[in-house]
Image: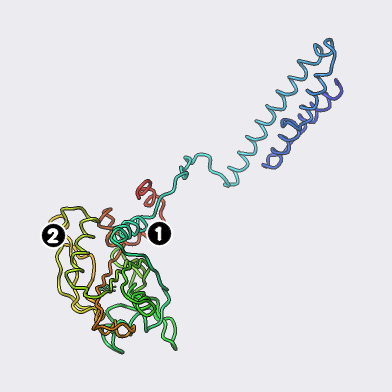
Amino acid sequence: MKDKIESIKKDIEQYSGSSAEAVEDFRVKFISKKSVINDLFEDFKKLSVEDKKEFGKTLNDLKTLAKEKLVSLSSGSIKNNTKNNTIDFSLPAEDDSVGSLHPLRIVRNNIIKIFRDIGFSIEDGPEIEEDWYNFTALNFPENHPAREMQDTFFISKDPDTVLRTHTSNVQIRLMEKQEPPMRVVIPGRVYRNETVSAKSHCFFHQVEGLYVDKNVSFKDLKDTLYYFAKEMFGSDTKVRFRPSYFPFTEPSAEMDISWKDGWLEILGSGLVDPNVLENCGIDSKEYSGFAFGMGIERIAMLKYGIDDLRLFSENDKRFLKQFRGVH
Ligand code: PHE
């Protein structure tokens, strides 16, 4: 026993190394449950009372020595890492334990829930899209300046392919394959060739709405959007419709909501142009419909007082952290 203690003591004293691995090796060899010192304590249990008296203290001293050595080895290892700039121990710990929903996701979910409660279902469609779905079937004539309203990223020719400039492409995809009645909302990302700034971005998000059935009127459109505005922005919210133009709706209107002391535009809408229904094989004498499209970023900016579009895509944790616990 005595010899063993002596030899382990020497090993401990002579042990050197400041890498994390060296410290860990030391811990396994001299401190852990499987260590040589632990084995000695097992042997110790079997000793006579006399021998226990003799070796008890030396064995405990050995254990203490190993512990102290571990502390000094690990502080050497910390210094080593600090010197090599691998770890800065003076930095405050970051609390990353709880994530949050992205504000665009929160607003998207809110919008979808409002429409789901009144019987709309959710659909989606491709972001890389053929000209037919993004423009032609939506009644944008060939070479018509209306195509220039939306600065398009063109991808390839034959068939002409673009990054969709709006979620209205999904209107066509759905109407081509489904029979009315249909009542859907379509959230998704859209792209426009614009310079990135606080006020414009080359991609953003929209929620499209489409309702097609027999006898759908402009009153249905107004009632639905009025209900949406009150649910989304509060029961005191007023709305106003202004005549507008989109190739795929007739008549078309933009909707403003009352905000602080004025009015703010939040969406485009209208009755689905009969040409669009016909392009999708729907009889426009039998059916009519309304459609609308709104920007999610715009609504998120209003709701949360965000003044720079770029914040949504920079993934700055200081920004995102503020939405912890918001649904
Ligand atoms: N697609 C239009 C836009 O991006 C919005 C819209 C959708 C207008 C549906 C009318 C009907 O601006």
- Read off the residue under disc 1: 314
Mark 2 and ligand 1: say if the CB distance to the nearest ligand atom is below 8 Å: no
Q: Nearer the viewer, residue 220 or 162?
A: 220
**Image: 154 above or below 300:** below
SS class of the residue under badge 2?
strand
How many other residues sit within 10 Å of disc 2, few (<14), some (14-19) or many (≥20)? Answer: few
User: Residue 178 appears in which quarter of the rendering?
Assistant: bottom left
Mark 1 and ligand 1: say if the CB distance to the nearest ligand atom is below 8 Å: no
Q: Nearer the viewer, residue 276 or 13?
A: 276
The residue that appears at 26% across and 72% down in the rendered structure is 291
**Image: 297 above or below 247:** above
Q: Is residue 205 visible?
A: yes
- Amino acid type, callout 1: Glu
**Image: 87 above or below 53:** below
- Read off the residue under disc 2: 262
User: Residue 140 appears in which quarter of the rendering?
Assistant: bottom left
